[in-house]
Amino acid sequence: MRVYVFSLLTTLMFATPVLAVDARIENAWVRPTVPGQKVAGAFMDISAERDLELVTVATPVAAAVELHFMRMDGERMEMRELESIRLPAGKTVRLEPGGLHAMLIGLKAPLGGGDSVPMTLTVRDGAGKQSTIEITLTVAAPRG
């Protein structure tokens, strides 16, 4: 029995550590759509206790989700896909209309006000370890 307990403890001591997610998600929402619309923006405030990167987002309501940056250049809108979004320790990163956001692509059905959208965010730390955060966003009209 002692050999078994020692073996188990040794295995647990040297097991690959799981990334503890030190991040908080607030004000998470998705823009409502009209019938036939196949894309929607998802927005939220993310704060991390240590340096992290948001690397992927997924939801069962869309075929894909891309991280995007959008800005206006005069009267021309510029939008580009990002590989990741840096989440510096102690700072709040806002995913918001007209800036950083998650773009839901290939929506499977229209999103109406009050609907819930489950979402999985994958973050990576400086050592390359990844972890997921499960959240639920509410479909709502833009604030302000």
Image: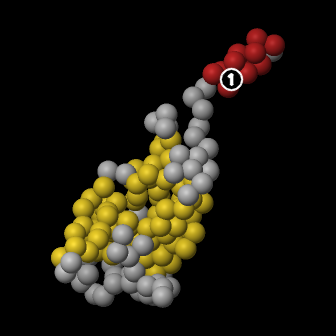
Q: Give the total of numbered labels.
A: 1
User: Mark 1 sits on what residue?
Assistant: 13
Q: Is residue 3 above or below residue 122?
A: above
Q: Residue at x 60, y 32 (%)?
A: 17
* SS for dot 1: helix
- Residue 93, position in %: x, y? 49, 62
- Residue 55, position in %: x, y? 40, 50
Residue 121: in sight, yes or no? yes
Left or right for 11, reference 59: right
State which quadrant residue 101 falls in. Answer: bottom left
Q: Residue at x 63, y 22 (%)?
A: 14
Q: Is residue 95 above or below residue 76?
A: above
Q: Residue at x 48, y 76 (%)?
A: 29
- Residue 111, position in %: x, y? 38, 81
- Kindly give the residue lying farthest to the left in the view shown: 76
Colouring method of the image: secondary structure
Residue 122: in sight, yes or no? no
Q: Residue at x 24, y 62 (%)?
A: 80
Left or right for 109, reference 143: left
Tag 1: amino acid: Met
- Residue 11, position in %: x, y? 65, 21
- Badge 1 crowding class, 10 Å Cα cut-off, few under 14, some 14 to 19, many 20 or more, is few
Considering depth in this image, is 57 or 10 the residue closer to the camera? 57
Q: Quadrant of the N terminus?
A: top right
- Kindly give the residue lying farthest to the front in the view shown: 74
- Kindly give the residue lying farthest to the top in the view shown: 3
